[in-house]
Image (spheres, helix red, strand yellow):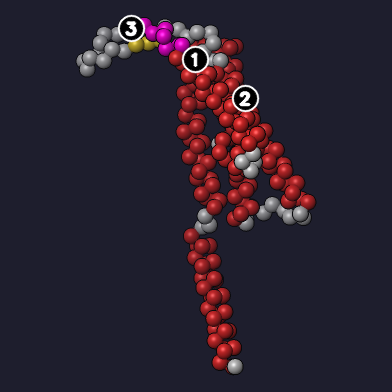
Amino acid sequence: MLFRVTSMRGHSPRVRFTLLVTFVAGVVAGVVVVGVGVRNEIPFPDPVSPLGIHLCMQNGFPPYVFASWPVVLVFEGMVVFFSISTALEHYRSVENASRRLQPSQPTTRLIYILFRDSITFPIIFIILCSINLLFSLVVSPEVGRAIIPISNLAPCILGPRLILNLRKAYYQPFSEECESTIALERIEFNHHLEDDIELRSR
């Protein structure tokens, strides 16, 4: 998503630096929180498994265990902000040029899907992070921990969906590709035939 937004913004150094700083801050905050929380481990009370694997469980979580979520919210919010601003600039330029967005056209549909996914998917992440943070602070940390796997699973689902949506928009259906290829061959054949007729007439 970071590369997608920076590409839509024309690889602006300011946008790239802002997103990179917030992304690195989120990663560092998550690593620090998890690294500190892992220290509070105690042996698992169940007997040792037959394979000789000793299991451990978490002896509670520190109160700042969800401190990384606000940083993630900031990063996703910046992605939404830059995506919306880019979409508005594009539609204004299209309106000024007296052109309309027609999803049936391949190039225009590609731009439409770029904007749609770049705005919708980060909003989904923001909603999930907000739910985790709200349940952890208002209800109980245990409830927040129960929702964390959903947030971890979301990128695994939405990431490939981004690629599939772009692929679907970029490539035409097989029947349309065949029709366009046949049409081009006919145009080229007619062009050569007209040249031959013109040469013979001379």
Please give the residue where the numbered disc 1 appears in the rendered image. 33
Q: Which mark is first along the chain, 2 or 3? A: 3
Mark 2: few, some, or many residues within 10 Å (few <14, many ≥20)? some
Relative to 92, say whether 57 is above or below: above
* Image-based side of 55 in relation to 201, left or right: left
| Front residue of this view, candidates 102 and 94 | 94
**Which residue is painted at 51% across and 21% down in the image?**
28
Please give the residue where the numbered disc 2 appears in the rendered image. 74
Secondary structure at badge 1 equals helix
Mark 3: few, some, or many residues within 10 Å (few <14, many ≥20)? few
Q: Alpha-carbon distance for marks 3 and 2?
A: 37 Å
Name the front one of labels 3 and 2.
2
Please give the residue where the numbered disc 3 appears in the rendered image. 43
**Which residue is painted at 56% across and 38% down in the image?**
3
Mark 1: few, some, or many residues within 10 Å (few <14, many ≥20)? some
Q: Which mark is first along the chain, 2 or 1? A: 1
What is the magenta range? 36-44
Q: Alpha-carbon distance for marks 3 and 1?
A: 21 Å
Q: Alpha-carbon distance for marks 1 and 2?
A: 17 Å
Q: Amino acid at mark 3?
A: Pro
Relative to 100, say whether 153 is above or below: above
Relative to 10, say whether 63 is above or below: above
